[in-house]
């Protein structure tokens, strides 16, 4: 087929790092976080050296300007997967340097526009986000479909970071709407149906952390509402309408802005309302039906921020409130629920699941970070988390009770136990595809080789980008490996 490049490009500096013309037609888009608030020019500059052994098709700078690094007709070196990059247009986006690698509105808006353009030029009417690695990689897109994939599926990375990962359903929906198609992309509540309560909490947690970073509404409070209103996403309303907050079609005169509801999709359902005297009455009400869970979360937040009661905001003071009990009371006092025990119900859920671990706070430099010490096997392995603590002492005690676990500070740095620095020593690698790099950090090029599984000797250590536990130099001289994936013997 004939390939073209995006007319949105304002700067071009072609990278020598590519494999020539693709061997597969374009049916995927893979957005990445570049880990830095870089300009469009600087993103291209990252890939001008052949020693870097990396590249991308497009870059989106911190001001939203688009650059071209590798022509669309060619396969870039971006996703740690030959098969993926042969069929994907890869996009590096300017972002913060720490998890969740947040992107500003200019970058995100340009990403939406660029994805729309890529789909149009390649004859696609839908952009799909299936939200599951195996489902996606085994999916055969129709001729008019484009599919979103992510770097973290092909390498031990968090790319594109939880900020964008939580918005991929929204990205797909916006692009598909602009193309005139329809899509059920994004997380479906049906994916929560067979999960345990703990599994459901872990799965939805990052969505609410990301939501707080853009809305200022405490993640723990919104999560507790989700759990209470939808029964961990398993209620009739959630399963059939992706409506996880009991949002009716008519709320506060529908006067708020930023709603993600399409204004017409409805799910009628019987519900009970409590009178002021404590008695209940059953009514039939129309509830909003959403394309995905992310839309339900977004609409819920938009309502809490923008709903009016006369000339004042119905939930005044909620945004930025850091006391979950106070925030829950604001929601109740604003008329969100009629239940007399609503506030206590929310607080009980927050305390049962320690949902404050998903909250985000501002540090002294107004950088949004998670305010907890987390105990995990590695920072990347969120599923291994044993607990989250405000007090470092308690976090250390938890790590002591769980050999092989580490305490990570809010920025993701391992702070306990202190890494052993005496060298040489041996480590065991249990994964077959641990990259060997030319220097101590992901900012150094790959050698093109993996360690494979086995025991290796480390002769030097160094801190570096991309590894919370640092980097180890192999005795063989082959290069450096991330110690996050190597257990000391």
Image (cartoon, rainbow, N blue to C red):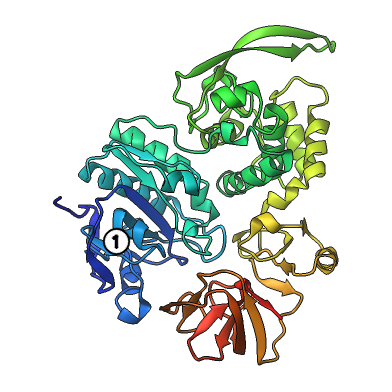
Q: Going by the image, does 292 lie left or right of 349?
A: left
Q: Count numbered badges in the picture.
A: 1
Whole-percent x, y for residue 254 in the image: 53, 21
Find disc 1 in the rendering and name its residue. Answer: 57
Measured along the vertical axis of the image, is residue 465 above or below residue 248?
Answer: below
Residue furthest to the front: 454
Q: Quadrant of residue 335?
A: top right
Whole-percent x, y for residue 381 in the image: 63, 60
Q: Quadrant of residue 423?
A: bottom right
Whole-percent x, y for residue 176 in the image: 35, 36
- Quadrant location of the C terminus? bottom right
Q: Residue at x 30, y 43 (%)?
A: 116
Q: Going by the image, does 425 lie left or right of 2?
A: right
- Which residue occupies the foreground of this view, 372 or 239? 239
Measured along the vertical axis of the image, is residue 86 above or below residue 46?
Answer: above
Q: Residues within 10 Å of mark 1 (few under 14, many from 20)?
A: many
């Amino acid at each position: 087929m004939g390939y073209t490049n995006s007319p949105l490009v304002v700067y071009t500096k072609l990278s020598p790092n590519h494999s020539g013309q693709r061997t597969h037609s374009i049916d995927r888009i893979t957005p990445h976080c570049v880990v830095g608030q870089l300009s469009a020019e600087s993103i291209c500059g990252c890939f001008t050296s052949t020693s870097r052994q990396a590249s991308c098709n497009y870059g989106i700078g911190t001001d939203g300007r688009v650059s071209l690094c590798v022509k669309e007709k060619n396969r870039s070196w971006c996703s740690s997967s030959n098969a993926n990059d042969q069929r994907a247009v890869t996009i590096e986006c300017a972002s913060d340097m720490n998890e969740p690698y947040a992107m500003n509105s200019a970058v995100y808006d340009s990403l939406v526009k660029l994805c729309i353009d890529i789909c149009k030029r390649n004859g696609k009417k839908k952009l799909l986000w299936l939200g599951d690695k195996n489902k996606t990689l085994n999916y055969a897109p129709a001729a008019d479909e484009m599919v979103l994939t992510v770097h973290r599926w092909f390498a031990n990375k968090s790319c594109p970071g939880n900020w964008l990962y939580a918005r991929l359903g929204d990205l797909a929906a916006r692009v598909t709407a602009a193309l005139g198609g329809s899509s059920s992309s994004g997380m479906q509540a049906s994916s929560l149906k067979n999960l345990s309560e703990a599994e459901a909490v872990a799965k939805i947690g990052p969505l609410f952390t990301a939501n707080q970073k853009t809305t200022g509404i405490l993640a723990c409070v919104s999560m507790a509402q989700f759990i209470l209103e939808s029964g961990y996403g398993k209620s009739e309303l959630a399963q059939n309408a992706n409506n996880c907050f009991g949002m009716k079609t008519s709320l506060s005169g529908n006067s708020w802005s930023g709603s993600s509801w399409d204004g017409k999709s409805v799910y009628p359902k019987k519900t009970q309302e409590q009178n002021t005297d404590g008695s209940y009455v059953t009514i039939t009400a129309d509830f909003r039906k959403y394309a995905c869970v992310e839309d339900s979360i977004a609409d819920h937040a938009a309502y809490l921020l923008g709903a009016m009661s006369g000339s004042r905001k119905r939930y005044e003071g909620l945004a930025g409130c850091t006391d979950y009990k106070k925030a829950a009371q604001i929601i109740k006092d604003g008329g969100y629920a009629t239940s007399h025990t609503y506030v206590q119900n929310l607080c009980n859920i927050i305390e049962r699941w320690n949902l404050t671990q998903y909250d985000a706070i501002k540090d002294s430099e107004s950088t949004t970070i998670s305010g907890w010490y987390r105990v995990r096997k590695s920072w990347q392995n969120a599923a291994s988390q044993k607990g989250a603590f405000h007090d470092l002492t308690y976090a250390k005690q938890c790590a002591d009770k769980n050999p092989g676990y580490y305490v990570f500070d809010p920025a993701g740095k391992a702070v306990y136990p202190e890494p052993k620095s005496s060298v040489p020593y041996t480590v065991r690698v249990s994964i077959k595809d641990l990259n060997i790099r030319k220097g101590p950090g992901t900012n150094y090029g790959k050698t093109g080789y993996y360690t494979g599984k086995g025991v290796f000797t480390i002769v030097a250590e160094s801190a570096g980008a991309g590894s919370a536990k640092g980097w180890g130099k192999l005795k063989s001289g082959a290069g450096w490996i991330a110690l996050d994936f190597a257990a000391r013997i």
